[in-house]
Image (cartoon, rainbow, N blue to C red):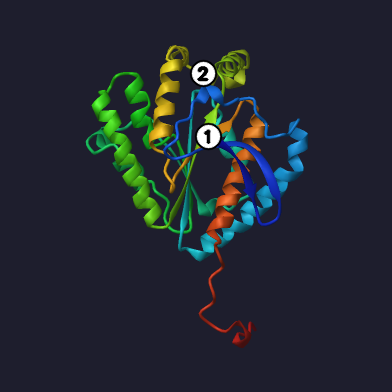
Amino acid sequence: MCIKRIITLGFFLMKTSLVTAVPGKKIRLCDIDADETGGYKSKEETLPRLEKLRERLAELQEKLYAEDRQSLLIVLQAMDTGGKDGALKSLLTGINPAGVQVTSFKAPSLEELDHDFLWRVHRAAPSRGIIGVWNRSHYEDVLITRVHGLIGKKVWRARYQDINAFESLLADNGVTILKFYLHISKGEQKKRLQARLDDPSKHWKFSPGDLEERKFWDDYQDAFEDAINNCSTEQAPWMIVPANHKWARNIALSEAVVAALEKMKPQFPQPKFDPKTIVVE
């Protein structure tokens, strides 16, 4: 079971294509339309709203940074060509880079392999006042490791509990967690892979290994479904973002992030002096 959300913001009410997994209720990715656009018909129709969202995000981020009491963690996962980089570029447009920490998780280093699987991600958790963004995350250790048989079923199933406990720890320490799965169809992935081959400026994004990974599409869908169903909690539910249309993906993400920050209610700190007594000569 999954539900579409109505996002309530301080300055408008808006529908979104986002689907939130309900803790304890199973979702099936095949039941979620990757072409969903939240009622919008075109990119141009979203632009005025997206501009307002970006302005509000910049305001809220400034307060969060100045307040220095809580933080926001944004986790992005997707299939290859799912659009994580493009989503981040859109989402972070116009905000103060000093208050943002983006971490991209690649294959673990030898040092990281010598620790538990959560060690490297815990070190990247955002400090107070910071919006942390993880491009891929600790979920890789129940996705690619599972699909390629690098760990057994007993291990990856146990990791769901470790992940939930880890995220609960972060939440208990003032971290609001937003987890997004950018949902594209297999047909859309084919188009995007072909586009990378057709455009010389995008050849660097393509690897023959992408085609090998594509053969595991169904296995990855099963792994993502299990991760979403087992690791959606009240403190950190998964949100599935229909992402075949990049513009629909972008506004859905902006809506969700702004809504979360509105709920956090960051405030500028009160000065420890009386500004009225200060004279600048």
Circle on res. 101 = none
Q: Which residue is drawn at 36% across and 49% down?
A: 168
Residue 263 in the image: state x and y as whole percent: 56, 56
How far apart marks 1 and 2 lie (CA) works out to 34 Å
Q: Which circle, 1 or 2, is nearer the viewer?
A: 1
> Count of labels shown?
2
Helix, strand or loop under label 2:
loop
Q: Please state if 154 lies on the left or on the right of 41 as rendered.
A: left
Residue under pointer 1: 2
Helix, strand or loop under label 1:
strand
Residue 266 in the image: state x and y as whole percent: 54, 62
Instruction: Check disc 1 and give the amino acid type.
Output: Cys
Q: Residue at x 63, y 82 (%)?
A: 280
Residue under pointer 2: 206
The crowd level at tag 2 (other Cα within 10 Å; few <14, some 14-19, many 20+) is some
The crowd level at tag 1 (other Cα within 10 Å; few <14, some 14-19, many 20+) is some
Seen as rendered, the residue at the extreme bottom is 277
In terms of image quadrants, where is residue 43?
A: top right
Q: Please state if 10 lies on the left or on the right of 174 as rendered.
A: right
Q: In this orientation, which residue lies closer to the viewer: 279 or 188? A: 188
Instruction: Check disc 2 and give the amino acid type.
Output: Phe
Residue 177 in the image: state x and y as whole percent: 46, 47
Residue 225 visible, this orientation = yes
Is 271 placed above or below 31 here? below
Q: In this orientation, which residue lies closer to the viewer: 109 or 59? A: 59
Question: Mark 1 near mark 2, Cβ–Cβ under 8 Å?
Answer: no
Residue 81 visible, this orientation = no
Q: Quadrant of the C terminus?
A: bottom right
Seen as rendered, the residue at the extreme left is 114
Q: Residue at x 63, y 47 (%)?
A: 7
